[in-house]
C-alpha cells in the first residue's frame, strides 16, 4: 500500500472516518450471516447508514464488521458508530 494514503481515494469519508459501503445482502455474504441478521443489527445497534441504492439501505460495512467481531469475541458492542470507530482504532493500534 502506498504510504501517501492514495490507495483509498474514491472511498467515502463520513465525519472524517473512512467507510466501506455495503447493502444488507452484500454484508451478509461477506460476514457469513443472513441478511435479516444484518438488518436486525442495524436497527438494534444504530449502524451508520450511508444512503440508499434503489430500494436497499447502504450501511457502513466496517461498522457491521466491528459488531460481528464483538459478538464473536463475546464482548459488549459499543452503543454508537463513533464508539465502534474508537474500538477499531484501539484494536488496530494494538495489532
Image: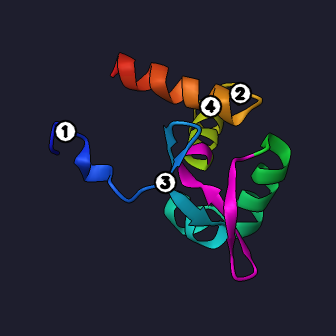
Who comes first in sequence, dot 4 or dot 1? 1
Q: Of tags 4 and 3, which is closer to the observer? A: 3
- Please tell me in which quadrant of the rendered image residue 38 appears: bottom right
Of badges 4 and 1, the one in the foreground is: 1
Compare marks 3 and 1 and give the one earlier in the sequence.
1
- Residue drawn at (55%, 46%) of the image: 65
> Which residue is at 77% across, 29% downward?
79
Quadrant of the snapshot with the N terminus: top left
Which of marks 2 and 4 precedes in the sequence?
Answer: 2
User: Of marks 3 and 2, which one's residue comes earlier in the chain?
Assistant: 3
Most distant residue in the left direction = 2
For mark 4, what is the residue?
Answer: 84
Which quarter of the figure is the C terminus placed in? top left
Q: Which mark is residue 4?
A: 1
Q: For mark 1, does the 10 Å Cα neighbourhood hold few (<14), some (14 to 19), or many (20 or more) residues?
A: few
Magenta region: which residues? 47-63
Crowding near pointer 4: few (<14 within 10 Å), some, many (20+)? many
Q: CA distance from mark 4 to mark 2?
A: 6 Å
The label shown at residue 12 is 3
Residue 2 in sight: yes
Q: Which mark is residue 78?
A: 2
Label 3 and label 1: CA atoms lie apart by 17 Å
In this rendering, would 25 be left or right of 36? left
Percent x, y of residue 30? 50, 63
Task: Work out whether mark 4 precedes mark 3 in sequence or the reverse, and give the earlier one.
Answer: 3
Q: Is residue 56 above or below residue 39?
A: below
Of labels 1 and 2, earlier in sequence is 1
Is residue 26 depicted above or below 49 in this figure? below
Q: Report if the CB atoms under discs 4 and 2 are less than 8 Å apart.
A: yes
Amino acid at each position: 500500500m502506498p504510504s501517501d494514503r492514495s490507495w483509498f481515494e474514491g472511498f467515502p469519508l463520513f465525519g472524517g472516518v473512512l467507510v466501506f459501503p455495503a447493502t444488507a445482502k452484500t454484508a451478509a455474504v461477506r460476514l457469513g450471516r443472513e441478511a435479516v441478521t444484518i438488518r436486525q443489527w442495524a436497527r438494534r445497534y444504530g449502524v451508520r447508514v450511508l444512503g440508499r441504492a434503489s430500494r436497499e439501505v447502504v450501511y457502513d460495512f466496517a461498522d457491521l464488521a466491528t459488531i460481528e467481531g464483538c459478538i464473536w469475541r463475546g464482548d459488549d458492542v459499543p452503543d454508537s458508530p463513533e464508539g465502534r470507530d474508537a474500538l477499531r482504532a484501539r484494536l488496530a493500534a494494538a495489532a
